[in-house]
Amino acid sequence: MVRLQDLKGQEVPKVNELLGTFLCNITNNATFTFLAQYGNSSESESGTWDFCKTVDSIDQPIPGRKHECPPQKGFGLVMMSGWVWPMFIVPGNYYFKFDATTKEGQRIYCLDTKIYLDYKAKDEEN
C-alpha cells in the first residue's frame, strides 16, 4: 500500500507493506540495500542499512509476538516508510531496487521496479 498526499513542497510520507511468508528465521545483522536511478541517467543513489532499523514493524500471527524484528519463520507483514520531496524529485521514469539479505547473504526479499512519478499541486491539476 502506498499513501501519497500533496503537501505543497513538503516531504510526502509513504507507507509500504510487503506481505508474504518467511521461509526461515532471520538472524540479527540482516541488511537492506536500495538503488534509485532516474531515467537513462548513469547517476544513482544507493546505500545499505541494517534491516531491522529500516522496517517500521513486522506483524506475524505468532502467539505473544508483537511487531518484532528480526522475523521468525512463517507468515508476515513488513511495514516500511519512505519519503518523497517534490522539490528534489522531477517527474519522469525511475528505477528502484530494494534488496534485503541475511548476514549470511541469503535473500529475504527483492523488489525491482520501474515507475513513472508525476505530481501536480492542486491548483495545477486543471
Image (cartoon, rainbow, N blue to C red):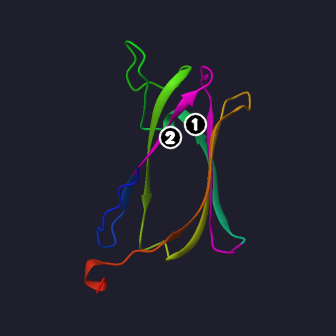
Question: Residue 122: x and y, percent?
Answer: 26, 78
The residue that mark 1 highlights is 50
| Residue 118: numbered disc | none
Residue range of the region highlighted in magenta in the rendering: 15-41
Nearer to me, 89 or 119: 119
**71 versus 37 height, above or below:** above
Asked whether disc 2 touches disc 1, contact meaning CB atoms under 8 Å apart, the reply is yes
**4 versus 100 height, above or below:** below
The amino acid sitting under disc 1 is Asp
Residue 122 sits inside the magenta stretch: no
Q: Distance between the residues labelled 2 and 1?
A: 6 Å
Residue 35 sits inside the magenta stretch: yes
Question: Residue 68: x and y, percent?
Answer: 44, 24
What residue appears at the point 61 percent right and 22 percent down from the top-left corner? Answer: 27
What residue appears at the point 33 percent right and 67 percent down from the top-left corner? Answer: 10
Nearer to me, 51 or 63: 63
The residue that mark 2 highlights is 54
Q: Is mark 1 on a helix, strand or loop?
A: strand
